[in-house]
Image: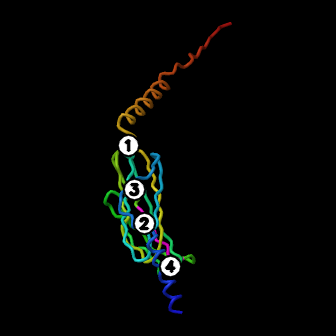
């Protein structure tokens, strides 16, 4: 019985060593300029992690991001803070029939063109995973607004200057 217990313990130790190490390096995600996704799995029980996702926006605009995780059992809880360029995402924890659902979001944040960073840091009591989505809507640049205004003005001027057929009246005396 003792040999069996020792063999089982050894097998678990070898399996634990084969689990991937905690992610602490920057991770670049593919972002098509409009939307993107990110996700990761914590390496195992009682581990701390820090995942950094880096992407670029093509121009200034509004960025929305969400993060979610679902646990089948509340004991497999993940405790995490999620930040976009240093700004903390806020949200709620909801108990559902499937388990504990944690969601965090940040909507319509004005960002400049260039590099954006999503940082997820925390700890997990058991092997857990999370995922999130990113959406981006560009803000028209001042030159685009000027061209649209000139275009509308040209259409209005054209409609106002449209030639109107002359009304011809004739009067005859018999």
Q: Earlier in the sequence, mark 2 or mark 4?
A: 4
* Residue for point 49% across, 72% down: 101
| Mark linked to residue 59 | 1
Give the residue at the far front of this rendering.
3
Question: Is residue 101 on the magenta stretch?
Answer: yes
Element at badge 2?
strand
* Residue for point 47% across, 73% down: 127
* Residue for point 32% across, 61% down: 87
Give the residue at mark 2. 104
Which tag is nearer the camera, tag 2 or tag 3? Answer: 3
Which stretch is magenta? 99-105
Give the residue at mark 3. 27
Near-viewer residue (1 or 83): 1
Residues tagged 3 and 4 counted as in contact (Cβ below 8 A): no
Q: Earlier in the sequence, mark 2 or mark 3?
A: 3
The colour mode here is: rainbow
Question: Is residue 64 on the magenta stretch?
Answer: no
Q: Is residue 115 above or below residue 160?
A: below
Which tag is nearer the camera, tag 1 or tag 4? Answer: 4
Element at badge 1?
loop
The location of residue 48, given as percent across then percent down, is 36, 71
Q: Quadrant of the C terminus?
A: top right
């Amino acid at each position: 019985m003792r040999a069996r217990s020792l063999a089982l313990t050894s097998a678990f130790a070898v399996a634990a060593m084969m689990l991937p190490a905690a992610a602490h390096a920057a991770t670049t995600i593919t972002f098509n300029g409009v939307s993107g996704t990110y996700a990761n799995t914590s390496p195992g029980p009682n581990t701390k992690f820090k995942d950094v996702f880096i992407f670029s926006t093509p121009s200034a605009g509004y960025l929305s991001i969400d993060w979610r995780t679902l646990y089948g059992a509340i004991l497999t809880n993940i405790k995490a803070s999620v930040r976009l360029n240093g700004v903390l995402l806020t949200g709620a924890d909801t108990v559902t029939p499937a388990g504990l659902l944690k969601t965090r979001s940040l909507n319509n944040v004005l960002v400049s063109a260039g590099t954006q960073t999503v940082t997820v840091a925390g700890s997990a009591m058991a092997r857990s995973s999370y995922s999130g989505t990113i959406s981006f809507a560009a803000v028209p640049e001042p030159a685009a607004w000027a061209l649209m205004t000139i275009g509308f003005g040209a259409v209005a001027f054209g409609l106002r200057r449209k030639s109107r057929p002359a009304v011809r009246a004739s009067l005859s005396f018999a």
